[in-house]
Amino acid sequence: MPSPAADFETQLELFRTEAESAIQYFYAWDTVRAVAAKDKEVFRLLNQAPLFWNTNLGALQTSTLVALGRVFDPDPKNHSITRLLSVAHANLDIFSKDSLAARKSSADADEWLPEYLQIAYEPNGNDFRRLKRHVADRRKIYETNYRPLRHKVFAHRGVATCVEVGELFAKTNIREMQQLLVFLGRLHEVLWQLYFNGRKPTLAPARFSVKRILEQPSPNAKHGKLQERLVHETKAFLAAHAKDA
């Protein structure tokens, strides 16, 4: 049986891969649509192989919802955001300064580690209760607006008619999905920084709108948050190939 620290590290890494996968799938899908709607050359490029692009966009849409389902899986036995926070909350000692010191140990640690530990943050139960409330708010959004679509259309065929499918899609919202996905990235960042660097788990704001990212790209978009890198790469790829089409 793994130690609490090893279990947390495993759960944190699994959460990262699922959250980042969902972000990549959705932002690739959304950026292709957004760029094609504004750029006639890109639109013509996509129309050279419409079946191919519709297949890929459909796969990205499906993959987003499947990944989200794994993230918000309520079963504590499965690898999910539920299990990650449960492991963290039940084992506060893995975030202690002594534990952090062991993780930061190096040949020259005596020169800088004592001062570093003075400002390191040790979380308490309230920190994780607060994070769990944030997750509960997002879980409610997922379960109300996206889980029915995932379960009845993408993962299983629970509805048959176009009207029924349309009713499920009508509950969704692009902006809401962007915020939901970027929250997952923000949550991973604060948990990683808390565990490996002893930083207080405060959720920092992050840009989420594809429209805004396209209109006002960050100077360091290539090295920015995952969603910004994905938007930048997708737009650059489409623009480069549209010129040759």
Image (cartoon, grey):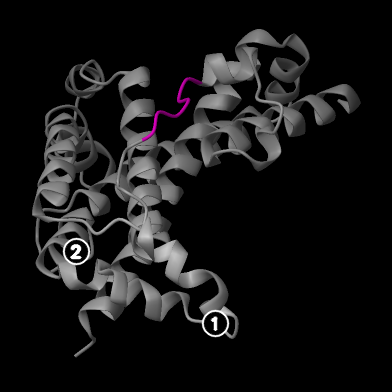
Q: Position of residue 45 (x, y in %)?
A: 75, 23
Mark closer to the chain start, 1 or 2: 2
Q: Residue at x 52, y 35 (%)?
A: 227
Q: Residues within 10 Å of mark 1 (few under 14, many from 20)?
A: few
Q: Residue at x 34, y 63 (%)?
A: 195
Q: Which residue is mark 1?
A: 106
Could you tell whether 167 is left or right of 120 in the image? left
- The reply to whether the C-beta atoms of the residues labelled 1 and 2 are less than 8 Å apart is no
Q: Is residue 13 above or below residue 167?
A: below
The residue at the far bottom in this view is 1
Q: Which residue is mark 2?
A: 88
Q: Residues within 10 Å of mark 2 (few under 14, many from 20)?
A: many
Q: Which residues are magenta?
A: 204-209
Work out whether residue 195 or residue 141 is closer to the camera in this orientation and state it.
Answer: 195
Kindly identify the amino acid type of the residue bearing the numbered disc 1. Ser
Secondary structure beneath dot 2 equals: helix
Kindly identify the amino acid type of the residue bearing the numbered disc 2. Ala
Nearer to us of marks 1 and 2 is 1
Work out whether residue 143 or residue 244 is closer to the camera in this orientation and state it.
Answer: 143
Q: Residue at x 70, y 39 (%)?
A: 222
Could you tell whether 239 is left or right of 1 in the image? right
Instruction: Determine the image quadrant of residue 170.
Output: top left
- The rendered magenta stretch, by its main secondary structure, is classed as loop
Q: Position of residue 202 (x, y in %)?
A: 31, 40
Work out whether residue 148 or residue 120 is closer to the camera in this orientation and state it.
Answer: 120
Q: Where does the C terminus fall, quadrant-wise?
A: top right
Q: Residue at x 75, y 30 (%)?
A: 236
Could you tell whether 20 is left or right of 145 in the image? right
Could you tell whether 60 is left or right of 159 in the image? right
Indicate whether residue 30 is drawn in magenta: no
Q: Position of residue 106 (x, y in %)?
A: 54, 82
